[in-house]
Image: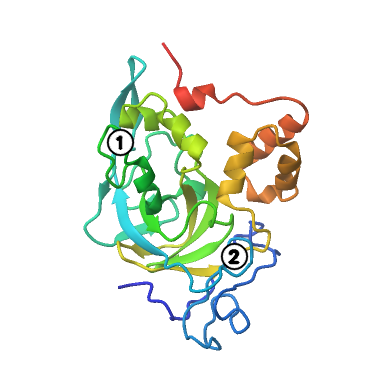
């Protein structure tokens, strides 16, 4: 199995001018006093360190992080509000490790490249822990039900610090942003308010960019390499951007580190500070004929 805990991995280079450039980072956990940025040579346990979401110890034994399923899919059509929309939401679990590059997994497609895909949305991860909370839905919710490429265990949106770097299989991923749910989730599940439910619960999943191409498969360990000190998680960005849209102090805090966010989100937050509230209906419900 790739991604064995305890192996020393080379640090991938920071993206020039990106999130990790000139930003303090530290690793913490059971051997916080002995470890540094994934180097476990001086760790008493000989295991890779556990990195807390805000640069703080996770407490006790760390939660195991691993890949449950890797999934890819082709573009197909969905019916929504009397029209046909393209979507690659329906993905199929791969039978073995899959090659992943800077634009995503081999064999995976994005139907809407304006809002999906690209280097900053190369891989969509969705916590497997969320599936129990969706068991009440009328349709049979089987993984992968939310269009994710990686169904992951042990890392939630509230753990995923923007800019955090993880070794996964033989690849290296970096958390880039939370997912903003759209109406295609509703079309995929046949539940008219599904995107709203996903958004309101915060069970959105999050995106990652690929710093080092490689192969990822089910069962691979997810190993923290480094976590930025700022502690801003995908859950917090989602909350401020999509839920508590009147929390202007939180918007100001996010804007103190604008390099963490896509330019369009920076624009949204700055406009809010100027009294202009953005519209979400088209994203959540889709245009009507």
Q: Residue at x 54, y 76 (%)?
A: 38
Q: Nearer the viewer, residue 200 or 88?
A: 200
Residue 64, position in %: x, y?
A: 42, 68
Does residue 91 appear anywhere in the picture? yes
Q: Residues within 10 Å of mark 1 (few under 14, many from 20)?
A: some
- Label 1 element class: loop
Residue 250, position in %: x, y?
A: 72, 43
Residue 220 position by quadrant:
bottom left
Does residue 146 appear anywhere in the picture? no
Q: Residue at x 71, y 36 (%)?
A: 247
Report the residue that reaches farthest toward the left: 95
Q: Nearer the viewer, residue 220 or 208?
A: 220
Q: Residue at x 51, y 42 (%)?
A: 202
Residue 189 position by quadrant:
top left
Q: Earlier in the sequence, mark 1 or mark 2?
A: 1
Residue 41, position in %: x, y?
A: 52, 87
Q: Nearer the viewer, residue 272 or 128?
A: 128
Residue 46, position in %: x, y?
A: 47, 86
Report the residue that reaches farthest toward the right: 274
Left or right of 6, for residue 227: right
Left or right of 138, for residue 40: right
In the image, which disc is placed on residue 142?
none
Marks 1 and 2, how far apart at CA: 34 Å
Q: Can you identify the residue that label 1 sits on?
A: 75
- Label 2 element class: loop
> Is the C terminus in the top left, top right, bottom left or bottom right quadrant?
top left
Q: Residues within 10 Å of mark 2 (few under 14, many from 20)?
A: many
Q: Can you identify the residue that label 2 sits on?
A: 227
Of labels 1 and 2, the one closer to you? 2
Q: Are marks 1 and 2 in contact (CB under 8 Å)?
A: no
């Amino acid at each position: 199995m790739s991604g064995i805990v305890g192996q020393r991995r080379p640090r991938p280079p920071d993206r020039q001018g990106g999130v990790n450039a000139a930003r303090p980072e530290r690793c913490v956990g059971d051997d916080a006093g002995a470890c540094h940025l994934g180097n476990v040579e001086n760790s008493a346990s000989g295991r890779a360190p556990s990195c807390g979401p805000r640069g703080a110890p996770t407490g006790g034994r760390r939660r195991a992080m691993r890949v449950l399923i890797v999934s890819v899919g082709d573009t197909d059509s969905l019916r929504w509000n009397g029209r046909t929309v393209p979507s690659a939401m329906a993905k199929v679990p791969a039978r073995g490790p899959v090659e992943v590059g800077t634009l995503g997994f081999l064999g995976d497609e994005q139907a809407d490249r304006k809002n999906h895909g690209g280097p900053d949305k190369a891989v969509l991860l969705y916590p497997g822990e969320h599936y129990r909370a969706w068991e009440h839905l009328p349709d049979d919710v089987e993984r992968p039900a939310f269009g994710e490429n990686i169904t992951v265990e042990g890392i939630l949106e509230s753990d995923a610090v923007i800019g955090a770097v993880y070794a996964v299989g033989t690849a290296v991923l970096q958390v880039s942003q939370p997912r903003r749910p759209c109406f295609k989730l509703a079309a995929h599940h046949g539940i008219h308010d599904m995107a709203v439910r996903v958004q309101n619960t915060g069970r959105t999943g999050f995106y990652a960019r690929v710093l080092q191409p490689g192969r990822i498969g089910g069962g691979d360990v997810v190993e923290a390499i480094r976590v930025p000190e700022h502690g801003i998680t995908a859950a917090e960005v989602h909350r401020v951007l999509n839920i508590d849209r009147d929390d202007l102090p939180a918007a100001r805090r996010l804007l103190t580190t604008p390099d963490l966010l896509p330019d369009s989100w920076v624009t949204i937050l700055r406009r809010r500070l100027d009294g202009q509230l953005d519209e979400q209906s088209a994203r959540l419900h889709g245009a009507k004929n």
